[in-house]
Image: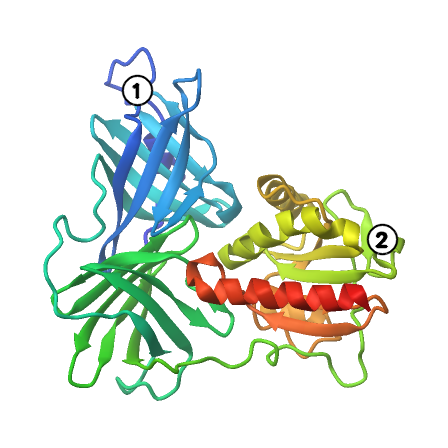
């Protein structure tokens, strides 16, 4: 359901009602809300926790709730009878009128210049369920690994391009899908009868999964509604041994190359190169990322505090940001916002646009940039020792723990050389 609303209509949602007669801004009831986006696939539910800022009745701290994740949005503000909840990193926001126990409005995302795509949004105070109010008994148990094919043309798992990892307790279901280029972050939902329902909303990812389970073949067959209008069929087969290609084999140096030759500007215009004294004789982690990328956000959440704990050991990090615009005037502020949000101490430069073909041209030593994020680890001599495509975030559970363990083991080895 692709909707482009005129700016004037959207602006009305964040302004006091002309006939409301309100002399002071409305107040939002603090606590948990069950929110839904109205998509082509039906209601996409997620949680919101809204809490007033101390000493201020016009601003609120807001968190999106998906499974075990409590993701902070940007500071929300109330004007007249409406609340605005921005997610600046993703060029999106929730705007809704406050109607007693209900918030009603739109989620909108900027696509180009002043063009916005939107979905209807509603949130009800005090409700915490995902898809069903009351747990119902089910004989289906989806816990485990599922070999998955998104975009299957035959209705069968002809090729495995993802692995579903689910944990079911009663009728509650959580988990994610691992792919060669990252994961689908925190998915939360229910099993109802013979059907699976999962959803996620984090300001960028807007995912609704539905599927029917066939006990005879141990398969799931269903659809994924993504974003404003995206749709993809998918099929999954229960397989405890399901696995993906080695993430260290997808991106590699071209024959004859031993290192990266990069030189790009920071938002302030200062050019940073791997030849700078800062990186000399140090183990260096090059992070290919974008401020628009939720998987990059997960990796940055790991790397930023890791760097603070480890930088005295002789390690450095350089972030190469590929943004929607290659213009420093437009993308520089986005990079700065990202640095502030994640308290990043290492430099992040603007390396180009987030088109993978253009990103590959910007890094000619690599065969290709196939995923955001991609992590390149360079030893003290300046030679590339490891390239990891994608990132398995904390929503993947043990797969994230395994990545962190392997990452630390490699860095320890290179630091000791």
Give whichever of 307, 181 is nearer the camera: 307
Quadrant housing residue 336: top right
Q: Nearer the viewer, residue 210 or 66?
A: 66
Residue 123 rendering spot, x and y as whole percentages: 25, 39
In percent of width and height, residue 257 lies at 80, 79
326 versus 107 height, above or below: below
The residue under label 2 is: 278
The quadrant the N terminus occupies is: bottom left
Q: Horizontal placement of 190 versus 203: left or right?
A: left
Sequence order check: which comes first, mark 2 or mark 1? 1
* CA–CA distance in space, label 2 to label 1: 52 Å
Neighbours of disc 1 within 10 Å: few (<14), some (14-19), many (20+): many
Q: Position of residue 357 (x, y in %)?
A: 62, 72
Compared to residue 295, the image places residue 6 above or below, namely: above
| Location of mark 1 (residue) | 26
> Who is closer to the viewer here, 1 or 406?
406
Q: Is residue 372 visible?
A: no
Q: Is residue 198 left or right of residue 108?
A: left
For the C terminus, the quadrant is bottom right
Residue 341, above or below 310: above
Residue drawn at point x = 75 percent, y = 75 percent: 365
Residue 312: image location, x then y, percent: 78, 49
What residue is at 45 percent from the left and 72 percent from the top? 179
Examine the image and state in which quarter residue 249 appears: bottom right
Instruction: Say if 334 sits above or below 79 in the image.
Output: below
Q: Helix, strand, or loop for circle 1? A: loop
Q: Residue 400 or 6: which is nearer the viewer?
A: 400
Residue drawn 51% across and 62% down? 401
Of helix, strand and loop, which one carries label 2?
Answer: helix
Q: Nearer the viewer, mark 2 or mark 1?
A: 2
**CB of mark 2 within 8 Å of CB of mark 1?**
no
Q: Label 2 neighbourhood size at 10 Å, few (<14), some (14-19), many (20+)? A: some
């Amino acid at each position: 359901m692709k909707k482009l609303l005129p700016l004037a209509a959207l602006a009305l949602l964040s302004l006091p009602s002309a006939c409301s007669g309100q002399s002071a801004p409305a107040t939002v009831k603090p606590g948990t809300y069950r929110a839904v986006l109205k998509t082509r696939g039906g209601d996409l539910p997620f949680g919101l926790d809204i809490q007033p800022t101390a000493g201020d009745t016009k601003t609120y701290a807001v968190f999106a709730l998906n499974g075990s994740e409590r993701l902070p949005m940007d500071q929300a503000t109330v004007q007249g009878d409406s609340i605005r909840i921005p997610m600046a990193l993703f060029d999106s926001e929730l705007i809704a009128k406050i109607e007693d126990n209900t918030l009603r409005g739109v989620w909108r995302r900027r696509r180009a210049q002043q063009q916005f795509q939107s979905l209807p949004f509603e949130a009800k105070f005090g409700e915490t369920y995902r898809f069903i109010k009351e747990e119902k008994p089910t004989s289906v148990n989806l816990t485990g690994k599922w070999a998955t094919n998104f975009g299957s043309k035959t209705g069968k798992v002809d090729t495995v391009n993802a692995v579903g990892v689910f944990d079911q307790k009663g009728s509650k279901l959580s988990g994610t899908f691992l792919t060669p280029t990252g994961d689908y972050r925190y998915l939360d939902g229910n099993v109802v009868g013979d059907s699976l329902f999962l959803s996620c909303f984090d300001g960028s990812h807007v995912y609704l999964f539905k599927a029917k389970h066939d006990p005879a073949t141990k398969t799931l067959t269903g659809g994924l509604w993504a974003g404003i209008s995206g749709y993809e069929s998918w099929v999954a087969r229960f397989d405890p041994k399901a696995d993906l290609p080695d993430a260290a084999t997808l991106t590699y140096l071209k024959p004859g190359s031993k290192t990266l030759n990069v030189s790009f500007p920071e938002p302030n215009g200062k050019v940073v190169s791997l030849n700078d004294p800062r990186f000399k004789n140090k183990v260096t982690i090059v992070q290919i990322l974008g401020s628009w990328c939720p998987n990059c956000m997960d990796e940055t959440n790991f790397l930023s505090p890791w760097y603070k704990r480890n930088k005295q050991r002789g390690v450095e990090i350089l972030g190469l940001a590929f943004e929607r615009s290659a213009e420093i005037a437009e993308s520089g502020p986005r990079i700065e916002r990202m640095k502030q949000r994640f308290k990043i101490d290492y430099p992040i430069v603007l390396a180009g646009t987030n088109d993978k073909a253009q990103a590959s041209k910007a890094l000619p030593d690599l065969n290709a940039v196939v995923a955001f994020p991609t992590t390149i680890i360079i030893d003290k001599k300046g030679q590339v020792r490891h390239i990891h495509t994608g990132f398995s975030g904390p929503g993947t559970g043990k797969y994230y723990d395994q990545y962190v363990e392997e990452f630390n083991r490699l860095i320890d080895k290179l630091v000791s050389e």
